[in-house]
Image (spheres, grey):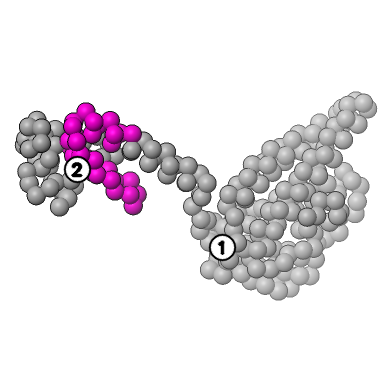
Amino acid sequence: MEENPNEKPLIGYCPDCQRQFCPKIPEGYKLTKLNHPARCPMCFVSIRHGLVKIEVRGQADEVETVSSRILSNLKSKFTRRKKLHPAAMDPITTITTITAGLELIDKFRDMALSFMRKENKPPSVEAKKKGTSIEISMNGHVTDKIDASQLRLSAWDQTRYSTLEIKVKKYWKQFNDIDAAIPDSSIDERTRLEIKRDGLRGDLCIAFREMLKIYEGTLGVQLGDHYSLYSVCGDDCLT
C-alpha cells in the first residue's frame, strides 16, 4: 500500500528502530507503508526510477548508504541511455528540419558554383514546405506531396543526424569566414585560403550527402538533381 502523494506524511515511530518518523523524504525516494504503522524511511526505502523499483531494508545507516548508491547508479545509467538513444523526432519537427537542411544545401551549392566559376543552371527539382507537408516539384509541376503523417520516421537516425549537424555547423562557419576573407587577402594568403576553402568544400560535400540520405529515407522519395551536389562535389564524395 503506497502513501497518497497528496496526503501529509504521518508522524510515528518505526517498529524496526523505534526512531521517530521523519516527514522529509530525500529527493528521489518514495515512501512505502507496510500495513501500518509506517516504517521509518531511514530503515525501509522504496526507490522508484522510471519503471525500476527497488526496496532496501536494514540498519538505518546501512539503508541510507546502500539506497543512495543504488539511486546514484540508476540515475547515471538512465542518463547514459538517454544520450545514446535520444527521443524520436516528431513528424512536424522532422518536416521543418528536412526543409531547412535542403535550403542550406542550396546555399552551399550556389556559393561553391560561384567560386568554382561554373554555370549555375536553375534546378529542375525543388522541395518546399507547404503547411505540414513537403511538396516536390519537377520543372514547376508538383510530382510528390509528402505529409508529416506519411514520413518514415523509423529511417530517421537522430543520433547520426545530430553528429552531422555539429559537423556542418562547424564547417559552414569556417567555409563562410574564409570565403569572405579571400577578396581582401594578399596573393600568397589568397592561395592558402583557397586551398583551405576547397578542403572544407569536400568536408561539406560528405556531410550534406549523408544528410540527404537520411532525408530521402525518411521521405521515401529520391530527390537527386542538384541536391546530390554532383555539380560541386562530383563523384569524389559519393559513398
Amino acid at circle 1: Ser
Which label lies toward us, 2 or 1?
2
Amino acid at circle 2: Leu
In x, y percent, where is residue 179?
Answer: 81, 36
In x, y percent, where is residue 177?
Answer: 76, 34
Q: In the rendered image, which residue does mark 2 sit on?
A: 31
Can you say whether 152 is above or below 77 in the image? Answer: below
Numbered disc 1: secondary structure: helix
Residue drawn where x is 7% and y is 46% of the image: 36
Numbered disc 2: secondary structure: loop
**48 magenta-colored:** yes
Residue drawn where x is 93% and y is 27% of the image: 187
Q: Which residues are magenta?
A: 41-69
Q: Nearer the viewer, residue 33 or 236?
A: 33
- On residue 88, the disc is none
Q: In the rendered image, which residue does mark 1 sit on?
A: 154
Q: Quadrant of residue 152?
A: bottom right
Can you say whether 151 is above or below 166 in the image? Answer: below
